[in-house]
Image (cartoon, grey):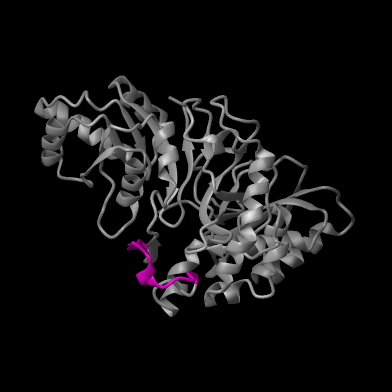
């Protein structure tokens, strides 16, 4: 049996890129037929968006903005070209954000990640993600059934009944949060229930630190992480190589500087932006609000798609300073005004019971008057005064932070 789900996983990077961008113009055209995307992408010619450089010129759509946009034009804010009745299921996620599910098999792209984790036809999977209004349960359910697995739609909680169904069906695999997997194992220990039938797992939706990974592994369970969102589905998945997470097929993923749509260099931490290729529910440069970085090279598991480090924090770094909101895009605007600037970080502090801010700037060169000029830009853009500190290239940490709020809590 193949270690790969299909041939797409091992095609050359050039072949993958050619395929994705050959399909993108038609998806863009479909998206722009929806009034929301029509306005958001006004003036865009889909026919010329055939490479990453052209895609990077399109405006970002922020997931954080969707609740307000959808509230104005329920249910999807005009960003879905198909009517609600054409979909198979309709969900709501915290925000609230309203999301549809298509009618095909494995619409969330979960099967590939489950296969990499060792799920195979004939497995019995206990799925503890919620089936109530949110897509999490159905996301994993559809992927497992696409592989030929039988699924126990357990949902979260109710450990007593979970013990009963595990005893009856003897599932070989688990899907759910890492926290609930630990709860199940400890509940089984407390009740003297044998759950050694569970040999593999996929976990998502919460941190899975090395200490918990080791604890689960000691219990004989081979667990793999999936990175997913309720809008896109599976964006990346862990493989047997345990070297970061491989991007899913049929997605175009960019890593951009927070507050902008500008792609960062390989290895630099930035915000995840995803474009899918589903004409019925298109997502065009959706900024999901999470940080990551691209890993160099290819995975030793044989998959050729780009690898990322996984979830590295949140990109939303808006700070309220002296009663004024300052956003990452404002910091980016300052950088655009000065060609000498390579990278910026606004550090927020507190001294003598007053908010302070210092703009730390990595620069290529320091012409006379640069500090004064940047200080003026800082005040013009943010409407606040702050200090400017000039730094050499490479001095700022590579952690994706544009605004670092270092004020003491409490």
Q: Is residue 316 visible?
A: no
Please give the range of residues in magenta: 79-94
- Compared to residue 129, the image places residue 65 above or below, namely below
Q: Residue placed at 29% from the left, 47% from the top?
A: 129
User: Where is residue 133, by image quadrant?
Assistant: bottom left
| Count of numbered labels shown in the rendering | 0
Residue 199 falls left or right of residue 83 = left
Which one is nearer the viewer's eye here, 348 or 274?
Answer: 274
Residue 15 coordinates in the image, percent (x, y): 67, 41
On the rendered structure, is 189 left or right of 92?
left
Q: Measuring 54% from the left and 53% from the top, which residue is drawn there?
A: 315
Residue 339 painted magenta: no
Location of residue 259 in the rendering, given as x and y in whole percent from the top left corner: 61, 59
Residue 97, compared with residue 313, is above or below; it is below
Question: Which image quarter holds the C terminus?
Answer: bottom left
Question: Image point 39% across, 73% down: which residue?
Answer: 75
For residue 27, say whether it is visible: yes
| Image location of residue 193, percent across then percent down | 12, 27
């Amino acid at each position: 049996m193949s270690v790969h789900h299909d041939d797409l996983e091992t095609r050359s990077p050039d072949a993958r890129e050619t395929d994705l961008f050959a399909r993108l113009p038609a998806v863009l055209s479909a998206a722009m037929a929806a009034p929301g995307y029509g306005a958001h992408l006004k003036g865009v010619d889909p026919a010329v968006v055939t490479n990453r450089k052209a895609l990077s010129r399109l405006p970002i759509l922020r997931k954080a903005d969707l609740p307000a946009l959808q509230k104005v034009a329920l249910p999807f804010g005009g960003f879905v070209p198909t009517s609600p009745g054409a979909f198979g299921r309709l969900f709501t996620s915290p925000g609230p954000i309203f999301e549809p599910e298509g009618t095909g098999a494995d619409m969330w792209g979960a099967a590939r990640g489950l296969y990499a984790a060792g799920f195979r036809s004939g497995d019995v999977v206990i799925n503890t993600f919620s089936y109530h209004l949110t897509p999490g349960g159905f996301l994993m359910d559809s992927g497992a059934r696409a592989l030929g697995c039988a699924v126990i739609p357990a949902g979260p909680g109710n450990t007593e009944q979970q013990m009963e169904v595990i005893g009856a069906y003897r599932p070989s695999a688990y899907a759910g949060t890492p926290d609930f997997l630990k709860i199940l194992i400890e509940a089984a220990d407390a009740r003297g229930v044998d759950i050694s039938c569970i040999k593999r797992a996929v976990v998502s939706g919460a941190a899975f630190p090395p200490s918990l990974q080791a604890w689960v592994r000691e219990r004989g369970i081979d667990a793999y992480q999936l990175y997913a969102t309720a809008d896109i589905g599976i964006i990346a998945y862990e493989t047997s190589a345990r070297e970061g997470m491989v991007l899913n097929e049929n997605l175009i993923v960019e890593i951009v500087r927070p507050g902008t749509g500008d792609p960062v260099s390989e290895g630099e931490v930035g915000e995840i932006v995803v474009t899918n290729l589903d004409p019925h529910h298109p997502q065009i440069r959706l900024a999901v609000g999470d940080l990551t970085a691209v890993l160099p090279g290819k995975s030793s598991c044989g998959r050729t798609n780009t690898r990322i480090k996984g979830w590295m924090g949140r990109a939303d770094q808006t700070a309220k300073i002296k009663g004024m909101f300052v956003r990452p895009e404002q910091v980016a605007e300052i950088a655009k005004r000065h060609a000498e600037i390579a990278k910026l970080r606004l550090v927020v502090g507190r001294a003598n019971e007053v908010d302070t801010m210092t703009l730390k700037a990595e620069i290529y060169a320091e012409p006379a008057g640069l500090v004064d000029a940047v200080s003026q830009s800082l005040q013009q853009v943010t409407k606040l005064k702050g200090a400017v500190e000039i730094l050499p290239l490479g001095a700022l940490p590579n952690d994706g932070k544009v605004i670092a709020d270092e004020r003491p809590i409490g």
